[in-house]
Image (cartoon, rainbow, N blue to C red):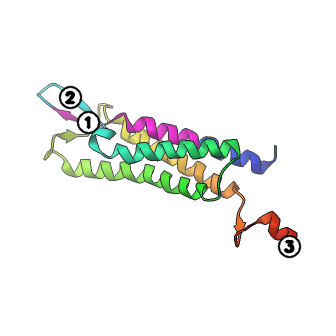
Amino acid sequence: MTVGKRLAAGSAIATSVGGVTTAIASLMSWSSFDSTLFSLYSVSGIALGYGVPTLLAGIGLTAIGLYGLHGSLRPRLPGLAITLAVVAVVVPVIARIELDLRGSEGPFHNHPAGLALGIYITELGGLVALLGSIGLHASHPRREEGRTASSADERQ
């Protein structure tokens, strides 16, 4: 197996693993709120609304990574994978900023007791998928003016 094929396979695996992690963590607890003095309820990313785009991005990244591992990757899919990975990284950051700005005004609080780990795991999965999708883009053969590199070589 050549170095290029190893890079492509490793990048496809990283993209898939990051996508699965992002999708699963979108369903985990992203925040928690106090209902009474001693009870905390956790809220998933889906319930907050921010988990929906990260769940869809995770599913898309998993599919693109599996296509890349299979070797049947279309030319525009590595660029789409980078876009989905950026969504998987940026949306939890926006959610954390919004939850921190709400502070004590709303019912949601990020408690340090480990109840809101899903938002951080989503970001971590998005970062892994971003690195994998950049490697996937780097290892994917380029097209020159609508032709593949091999057909451009045949013309010369």
Q: Main secondary structure of the magenta part?
A: helix
Q: Residue at x 49, y 52 (%)?
A: 84
Q: Position of residue 107 (x, y in %)?
A: 16, 40
Earlier in the chain: of badge 1 and badge 3, it is 1
Quarter of the picture holding the N terminus: top right
In the figure, residue 154 lies in which quadrant?
bottom right
Q: Which residues are magenta?
A: 15-34
Tag shown at residue 111: 1
Amino acid beneath label 3 = Arg
Q: Is residue 121 left or right of residue 64?
A: left
Tag shown at residue 40: 2
82 shown above or below 34:
below
Q: Is residue 71 left or right of residue 34?
A: right
Q: Position of residue 150 (x, y in %)?
A: 82, 63
Q: Does the CB distance between marks 2 and 1 fall below 8 Å? A: yes
Q: CA distance from mark 1 to mark 3?
A: 64 Å
Q: Is residue 19 magenta?
A: yes
Tag shown at residue 155: 3
Quarter of the picture holding the C terminus: bottom right
Q: Is residue 99 left or right of residue 148?
A: left
Q: Is residue 155 magenta?
A: no
Earlier in the chain: of badge 2 and badge 1, it is 2
In the figure, residue 139 lies in which quadrant?
bottom right
Q: Position of residue 124 (x, y in %)?
A: 47, 43
Q: Residue at x 27, y 42 (%)?
A: 48
Q: CA distance from mark 2 to mark 3?
A: 69 Å
Residue toward you, 56 or 102: 56
Amino acid beneath label 2 = Leu
Q: Position of residue 147 (x, y in %)?
A: 74, 68
